[in-house]
Amino acid sequence: MDKYDLELKTYYFDRKQEIKKEYVGYVSKHNEIREILNDFTSNLLFNKPEDPYKFAKDYFSFFNDKANAPVLKPLIISGPWHIGRVKLCLCVSVHSCLSL
């Protein structure tokens, strides 16, 4: 049993070193990661929010252009031929574009 424990520990240690090397390489290629995380940590510790998860969500939503985009719900228009579905679709799309 000890043989397997030693092999398993060696495997996990080696794998941990590989992953660490991979992560360090990635962060060194992308210095902005360190800057973003340092800024976030500084803001978090300075503001000391009651809900750190909400604070993180709000803080990082700045970087997500789609976070503030309106949620669009699908509209399905069906019916028999020649009742004006295309005209209705055009009308709905023009009005919904104007309201954005």
Image (cartoon, rainbow, N blue to C red):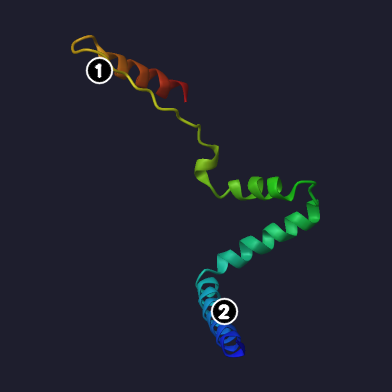
Mark 1 Cα shell of 10 Å, populated few (<14), some (14-19), many (≥20): few
CA–CA distance between discs 2 and 1?
Answer: 59 Å
Q: Is residue 79 left or right of residue 34?
A: left
Compared to residue 69, the image places residue 5 above or below, namely below
The picture quadrant where one finds residue 54 is: top right
Q: Which residue is mark 2?
A: 16
Please report the residue visible at 74 percent of the width from the left and 60 percent of the height from the top: 42
Q: Residue furthest front?
A: 1
Instruction: Tell me the mark number nearer the camera, choosing from 2 and 1.
Output: 2
Image marks 2 and 1: residues in contact by CB distance under 8 Å = no
Q: Nearer the viewer, residue 40 or 82?
A: 82
Q: Which residue is mark 1?
A: 86
Q: Nearer the viewer, residue 47 or 23?
A: 23
Compared to residue 73, the image places residue 61 above or below, namely below
Q: Where residue 94 sits: x, y (%)?
A: 36, 20
Q: Amino acid at mark 1?
A: Val
Mark 2 Cα shell of 10 Å, populated few (<14), some (14-19), many (≥20): few
Please report the residue visible at 24 percent of the width from the left and 11 percent of the height from the top: 84
Element type where label 1 sits in the image: helix
Q: Amino acid at mark 2?
A: Lys
Q: Nearer the viewer, residue 34 or 5?
A: 5
Marked residue nearer the N-terminal end (2 or 1)? 2
Q: Where residue 25 sits: x, y (%)?
A: 51, 77
Q: Where residue 71 sits: x, y (%)?
A: 49, 32
Compared to residue 58, the image places residue 91 above or below, namely above
Q: Residue furthest left?
A: 82
Please report the residue visible at 40 percent of the width from the left and 27 percent of the height from the top: 74
Q: Indicate which disc residue 23 carries.
A: none
